Image: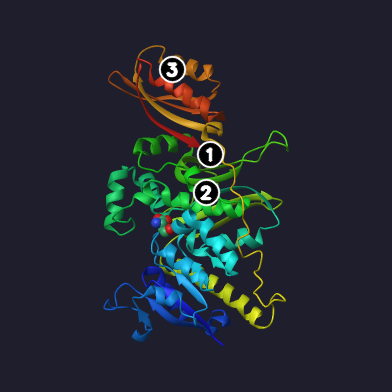
Amino acid sequence: MAFKIGLLGLGTVGTGTVEILLDPAQRHPLLRELEIYRVGVRSLDKPRSVALPTSLFTTDLESIVTDPNVDIVVEVIGGLEPARSLILKAIAHGKHVVTANKAAIARFGEEIFDAASEAGVYVLLEAAVGGGIPVIEPLKQSLCSNRIHTVTGIINGTTNYILTRMQLEGADFADVLADAQRLGYAEADPTADLDGFDAADKIAILASLAFGGRIKLSEVHCEGIRQVSAADIAYAEKLGFVIKLLAVARRTPQASPEEPEQLQIRVHPTLVPKAHPLASVNDVYNAILIEGEPVGQVMFFGRGAGSGPTASAVVADILNIAALLKVERGGVTRSDGTPLLDPLLACSHQHYCAIAPMDELITRFYARFITNDTPGVIGKLGTSFGNHNVSLESVVQTDVRGDRAEIVVVTHDVREGNFRKALDEIHAMEAVSSVASTLRVL
Ligand code: HSE
C-alpha cells in the first residue's frame, strides 16, 4: 500500500520535492511506495514545470490536512501563517508532518511538538536548517551518544555570499547587496537574512537538539552584518582573519557541577582565524561544526538553500516516516494499538534551557577607533581597558588622515560586560571621535 503525501506548496522547494518523487530510479526503493496524493497551491492557473495531473491540485489547503487518506503532510509554503495552523490541524488529524519551516518551528515549536507527541505523530524538519546538509538527523541520532559542547555554524547563505564578495572584491556592503539582489541571491526584502534573524531561528533549532531543551527565540542574541564595513574586512585580513556571520550555541563552563547549567546562544559577525575550518566556507555555502565528547569535532558542509538541496532533505524526512509506517503497519504498535514513536526521531523536550546573559560571555574582541592623532591617545585607550580588566593582545595604529588616526585593537579573552564598560568610557574621551566598530573574535 502506498504512503499518501499531501503537499502544501509548489514553489521552489515543493517543485524540487515533486521532481525527486516522480523520478525514483537509482534512489531508495521505498520512494516507489510514495504517492503524491494532493497538492495545495495558491493559484490553479499558474503554469507548473512538473508533470502532475491537474486533478491533484487544490487551493483549499485545509482539505488536504484533514483528508483521511493522507498519511504525511509536507509543508513547504513557509512563513508563519497559515503554515502554523495547517501543521497543527494536520497533527490533530493524525498526520505525520515534514516541514522546511524554520521560522514557524523556532517560534511555535513548543505548541507543535506538544501536539505531535499527544497525537503520536512525527514532525520532521531536516530541511529547516542547512538546506541539503544533513544536520538535524545526525544531532538526533548519529551523534546522540555524545555530550555536545558547541555548535558553530555558517547557516545563512545570503550573508555568507555578501561577506565573501566583500572580502574578495574589497567592496562595500551596500554595493554587494544591490548586486546580490539583482542576481537573485538576496530577497527583495532581505531583513531576515541581513539582520541575523534567519540564522537565529536556525541556531535555536540546532541548540534545542544539541542540548536537549527548548530555546526561547527572544533569548537568542542577534546581530546582523549591516555594520560590517570594507575597512573592517581589510583590517581583519591583515590580522589573519576573515569575517563570517556565525551562529553559536555553547554550554557555558560550570565552576562546579552544582551550578545550574547555562547556554550561550548568539548570532553575530565574527573574526574567524584563517586556519579555522569555517574560514574557508564561502559564497552561498553553509557549514556546521559540532564539538562533542567523545566524538571531537565533526563538520557538515553543503548547500544551505535552493530547490534541489532543500528537497533532498524534505524527501529524506518523508522516507524516514514512510519507513517507520511500514514497520508499524507490519505490526509494531503498543498493546493498545496506538503507534509507538521512535524516541530518537520524536521530540522529547519538556524544559527550556537557561541562557547566559551576553555580559557574561568570555570572548576576544576586535575594535576600531577613530581618534585625534595626538600624543597619548593609545595610552589612554590602554589605561581604560586595563582599568576594566580587559587585556589587549594587539594595538595597531594603521592609518592617519590629516589629524585623524585609526586605531585597531584585539583583546585577549575578556568578559563582555567589562569590555562594554571600557568602551563606554572610551566613547566619552575627548580624543576619541568614534568607536567605528566592535566585533567578536573566535
Ligand atoms: N534565506 C536563507 C539563506 C535560505 O540565505 O541561507 C533559506 O533558509
Q: Residues within 10 Å of mark 2 (few under 14, many from 20)?
A: many
Question: Which residue is painted at 39% across and 36% down in the image?
Answer: 232
Taking the image as shown, residue 376 lies to the left or right of residue 386, namely left
Pointer 2 and pointer 1: residues touching (CB < 8 Å)? Answer: yes
Residue 269 is situated, as x and y percent measured from the top left of the image, at: 44, 41
Percent across and percent down for residue 62 are 40, 73
Q: Is residue 172 visible?
A: yes
As helix, strand or loop, the secondary structure at mark 3 comes to helix
Where is residue 428, by image quadrant?
A: top left
Given contact means CB atoms under 8 Å apart, are the residues at marks 3 and 1 in contact? no
In the displayed structure, would residue 176 be above or below residue 442?
below
Q: Answer with mark 2 or mark 1, whichever residue precedes in sequence.
A: 2
Give the residue drawn at x 62%, y 39%. 252
Among numbered discs 3 and 2, the one appearing first in the sequence: 2
Residue at numbered disc 1: 442
Q: What residue type is labelled 3?
A: Ile
Mark 3 residue crowding within 10 angstroms, few (<14) / some (14–19) / many (20+): some
